[in-house]
Image (cartoon, rainbow, N blue to C red):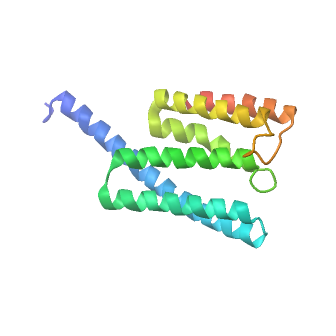
Amino acid sequence: MPSQPLDFRAADAMKNEDDHVLRVMKALGYTAALMALLIGAKSWLSDHLPHAWTLFVFSALMASNCLVFDRFNKERPFRALFLILVSLLFLYLIASGGESNTGALWFYVFPPFVFYITGPKGGLILMGIMLALIMLIFRFPELPFVWTTYSMDYQIRFFATISFSTTFAY
């Protein structure tokens, strides 16, 4: 005979899963901050200063978000800022091309990441928003914040492959 009613065990399981997701997010946040700092340093040494500064700012913001969460344990602001920062970083990488026009490749980690953190409904909403914004970047390279162009062949292949990645992540 179980010592707890079924609904309490289900609530405990959900709480444990949520705690696990937060630990993963925190580890990803600190790792992303470190990687952005290192890639930013490489960009600095390669004299790609705007790219380097963007990565340094992202690194500082992401590390600060994680440190504030460690201190105050406020889950909702941590999750929201985490998703905003990562989304903005990926949009920047696509709009700027990153280094050697490889910025869009980083977006392939976004579908499994966003579905893991937000669940199916939130993941679909955020993926829809991001894909719409990426389509704007691809179709309107004359926008002031877009620094690179992508061929039509690349755009078609990108959306086809990211659709598969999104479907599997869902």
From the viewer's perspective, is residue 141 above or below residue 77? Answer: above
Q: Is residue 103 left or right of residue 30?
A: right
Q: Is residue 150 left or right of residue 44?
A: right
Residue 36 figure quarter: bottom right
The residue shown at (30%, 57%) is 72
Q: For this rendering, which residue is in front, 148 or 20?
A: 148
Q: Name the residue: 46% across, 48% down.
A: 81
What residue is drawn where x is 44% and y is 57%?
65
Residue 55 horizontal/vertical position (percent): 63, 60
Classify residue 118 as left or right of residue 162.
Answer: left
Q: Residue furthest front?
A: 144
For this orientation, the residue located farthest to the bottom is 45
Number of callouts: 0
Q: Quadrant of the N terminus?
A: top left
Q: Is residue 21 visible?
A: yes
Front one among 6 and 43: 43
Q: Residue at the spot x=31%, y=54% of the render?
A: 73
Q: Quadrant of the C terminus?
A: top right
Q: Position of residue 97 (x, y in %)?
A: 76, 49
Q: Quadrant of residue 113?
A: top right
Question: Which percent across, then down, holds residue 14?
Answer: 31, 36
Determine if residue 105 is in view: no
Question: Please, is residue 160 above or below residue 56 in the view?
Answer: above
- Pick the front one: 59 or 25: 59
Where does the image place residue 149, in percent across and percent down from the top left? 83, 42
